[in-house]
Image: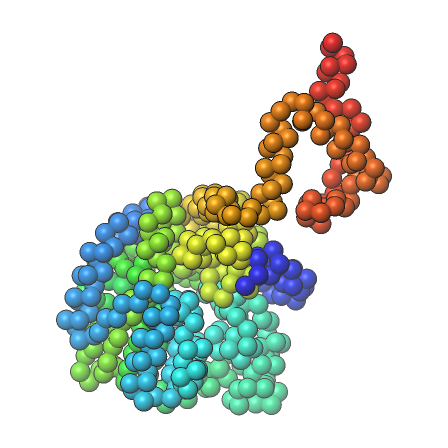
């Protein structure tokens, strides 16, 4: 991935993409605001959600051990994956063991985080998306742009064209209205479910005391995944654990209102191990770390692991609304991606180091977060980590060289005054009509998006010395 600023250029120049995103985020933003305004105890629910998530994270090791015991006692199998590569090996081995050549997969950012689709394709296994949004993304051969609505960057005409080419149930000339497109998608997906022997899903919550996996969804694709296939594989981050069933009372109110703007999610599915004669014969739970313990060790950044992936922060973010999810990377878009990705992966690469700067720090994301993550505070902390990582490089970056030069110049009054006199002279030579529209070298980054006022012919220090001497 290139740096965020470079990756965002194509999105910023795509007027159709920006129009689609603006309409989608505005609609979801209004629904969320209305839903959050209904309960009189909404702020109390948010505070309780924050407290439960913090408590779970502080005792995460104990809760994970309890979860493993409960899942095993219920007839399931728990697999531990330290990173994405290990998760790919585990899941690919499980699928190969069934002999299946096709799997259906429910929507899951955690599964996408592992790069599982490509690994299964290399193993000769075809992955078929179970959700409508994910199916649209797969047909368009692009990446999801939103946690909740993966195809938010597509409009009806684009979706209709994709269906015309790849979905037989849509007919040769599919209508561009949502009802007709949904009916075509439903008919197309049902045939996949009826043939599937193996299903892969994610999870929204893992209840430690009972070993129960909880999944909330608007379409029911996840429920189909855990009903018909013989083998069910769930990939979940270790941060999804909640201690007790009673905790779900809070999150089943917070998540629907903050994600889809509904009082209740249409489909709330929960499953515990295996039950003879009902559902899958085998259940495998893959618990993924992949940088989460690294984030947990960061006292200032660990608050990001409270995230319940509701997407409320995306819908209020002015940066995301203009760029979409692509520039943030293939998994987590918007403010949640700007903080989670560098926390879990580090800030060594240029792309990851650029993400904490993909924010205006306006604070709108913190205001709507249902578990009260102070996202701007985490991003500022990560910006500090980026600066510190650059200090340790044997060869400093051009920006660091420039800043050190400025520090040296401004550290001595004589050097500062000399630089001001010479700099003013050159700046006035570069000006046109009282503005500097283009600066040379690294300083040109400033003038790509703004003009610089011409400095006055006499500095304040010179004026003071002349008039007060």
- The percent coordinates of residue 47 (x first, y second) are 33, 46
- The percent coordinates of residue 205 (x first, y second) are 30, 63
Q: Residue furthest right?
A: 433
Q: Quadrant of residue 112?
A: bottom left
Q: Is residue 69 above or below residue 166?
A: above
Q: Residue furthest top?
A: 469
Q: Residue at x 54, y 63 (%)?
A: 1
Q: Quadrant of residue 85?
A: bottom left
* Quadrant including the C terminus: top right
Q: Is residue 254 visible?
A: no
Q: Residue furthest left?
A: 73
Is 200 left or right of 313, judged from the image as shown?
A: left
Viewer-nearest residue: 448 or 272: 448
Is 448 left or right of 222, judged from the image as shown?
A: right
Q: Is residue 81 visible?
A: yes
Q: Residue at x 58, y 43 (%)?
A: 400
- The percent coordinates of residue 422 (x first, y second) are 76, 31
Viewer-nearest residue: 13 or 401: 401
Q: Is residue 9 above or below residue 164?
A: above
């Amino acid at each position: 991935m290139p740096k965020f600023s470079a990756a965002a250029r194509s999105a910023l120049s795509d007027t159709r993409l920006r129009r689609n995103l603006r309409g989608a985020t505005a609609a979801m933003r209004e629904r969320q605001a209305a839903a959050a305004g209904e309960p009189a105890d909404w702020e109390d629910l948010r505070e309780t959600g924050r407290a439960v998530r913090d408590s779970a994270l502080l005792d995460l090791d104990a809760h994970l051990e309890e979860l493993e015991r409960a899942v095993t006692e219920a007839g399931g199998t728990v697999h531990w994956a330290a990173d994405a590569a290990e998760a790919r090996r585990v899941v690919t081995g499980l699928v190969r063991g069934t002999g299946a050549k096709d799997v259906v997969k429910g929507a899951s950012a955690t599964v996408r985080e592992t790069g599982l689709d490509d690994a299964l394709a290399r193993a000769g296994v075809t992955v078929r998306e179970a959700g409508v949004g994910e199916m649209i993304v797969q047909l368009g051969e692009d990446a999801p742009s939103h946690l909740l609505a993966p195809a938010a960057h597509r409009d009806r005409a684009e979706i209709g064209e994709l269906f015309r080419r790849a979905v037989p149930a849509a007919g040769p000339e599919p209508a561009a209205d949502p009802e007709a497109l949904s009916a075509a998608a439903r008919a197309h997906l049902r045939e996949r479910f009826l043939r599937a022997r193996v299903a892969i899903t994610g999870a929204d919550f893992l209840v430690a005391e009972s070993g129960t996996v909880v999944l909330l969804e608007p379409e029911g694709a996840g429920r189909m995944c855990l009903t018909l296939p013989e083998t069910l594989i769930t990939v979940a981050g270790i941060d999804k654990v909640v201690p007790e069933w009673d905790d779900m009372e809070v999150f089943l109110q917070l998540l629907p209102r903050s994600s889809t703007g509904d009082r209740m999610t249409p489909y709330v599915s929960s499953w515990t191990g295996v039950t003879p004669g009902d559902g899958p014969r085998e259940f495998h739970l893959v618990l993924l770390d992949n940088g989460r313990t690294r984030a947990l060790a960061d006292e200032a950044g660990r608050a990001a692991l409270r995230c319940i992936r509701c997407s409320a922060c995306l819908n209020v973010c002015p940066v995301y609304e203009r760029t979409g999810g692509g520039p943030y990377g293939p998994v987590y878009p918007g403010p949640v991606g700007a903080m989670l990705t560098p926390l879990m992966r580090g800030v060594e690469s240029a792309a990851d180091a650029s993400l904490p700067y993909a924010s205006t720090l306006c604070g709108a994301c913190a205001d709507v977060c249902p578990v009260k993550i102070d996202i701007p505070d985490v991003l500022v902390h990560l910006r500090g980590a980026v600066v510190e990582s650059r200090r340790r490089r044997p060869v400093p970056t051009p920006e660091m060289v420039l800043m050190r030069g400025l520090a040296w110049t401004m550290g001595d009054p004589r050097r500062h005054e000399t630089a001001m006199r010479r700099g003013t002279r050159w700046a006035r030579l570069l000006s046109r009509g009282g503005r500097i529209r283009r600066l040379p070298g690294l300083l040109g980054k400033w003038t790509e998006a703004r003009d610089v006022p011409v400095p006055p012919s006499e500095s304040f220090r010179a004026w003071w010395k002349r008039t007060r001497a």
